[in-house]
Image (cartoon, rainbow, N blue to C red):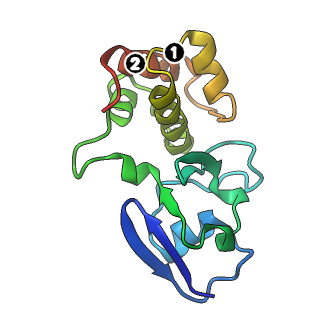
Amino acid sequence: MRLNVTINGEEREADDVWEGESLLYVLRERLGLPGSKNACEQGECGSCTVYLDDVPVCACLVAAGQAEGRVVRTVEGLANGDALDPVQQSFVDNGAVQCGFCTPGLVVAAHDLLNRVPDPSDEEIREALAGNLCRCTGYEKILDAVRAVAKGGVA
């Protein structure tokens, strides 16, 4: 099938897509958007989190056919040209990035939280990020990054 989808504000097509292949595979392998990471392929780690029609989803669990005619926003689409989104910048500034494998999903999850709850409590931050696993940072710097951007607001 031919998949027609709006990704990061741009109409995109992918040909020869099997309806059951994952949206993650289409993004990474067919459309050249490697930001979302392929870690568990079971929706357990959150590394592949993207927005689908403004709702965060694990792209590994979304069949490509389900994305037909819909709007996807990846971690790459959070930036404004060369300017990082405040959440992305805060992760860099607060040392919340180590190996980087979990970072795209954590950034999208934090971005979603801050758009819904501009000044979240620590409990709300932990709950919002609970579906994202990190093996490197110990989470404290990730929490610091979310707290820091919450004080300044999300653009």
- Residue contact between numbered discs 2 and 1, judged by CB atoms under 8 Å: yes
Whether 78 is drawn above or below 20: the answer is above
Asked which quadrant contains residue 131, the reply is: top right
Q: Nearer the viewer, residue 138 or 13?
A: 13
Marks 2/1: CA distance? Answer: 7 Å
Tag 2 secondary structure: helix
- Which residue: 68% across, 58% down? 60
> Tag 1: Cα neighbours inside 10 Å, few (<14), some, or many (≥20)?
some
* Quadrant in the picture for the N terminus: bottom right
| The residue positioned farthest toward the left in the image shown | 82
Task: Between residue 33 and residue 125, name the one nearer to us.
Answer: 125
Secondary element at image label 1: loop
Q: Which mark is residue 8?
A: none
- Label 1 sits on what residue type? Pro
Determine the image quadrant of residue 129. Answer: top right
Q: In the rendered view, tell whether residue 15 sits above or below residue 68.
A: below
Q: Earlier in the sequence, mark 2 or mark 1?
A: 1
Image coordinates for residue 70, horizontal then vertical, percent: 54, 65
Residue corresponding to mark 2: 150
**Residue placed at 73% from the left, 51% from the top?**
40
Residue 88 picture quarter: top left
Residue indicated by mark 1:
120
Rendered residue at 38%/32% (across/down): 87
**Figure quadrant of the C terminus:** top left
Is 32 above or below relative to 152? below
- Residue density around tag 2, few if under 14, some if 14–19, many if 20 or more, within 10 Å: many
Amino acid type indicated by mark 2? Ala
Count the numbered circles shown: 2
x and y percent of residue 123 in the render? Answer: 63, 12
Q: Left of 59 or right of it: where is 43?
A: right
Question: Which percent across, then down, holds residue 3?
Answer: 56, 80
Q: Position of residue 16 (x, y in %)?
A: 60, 89
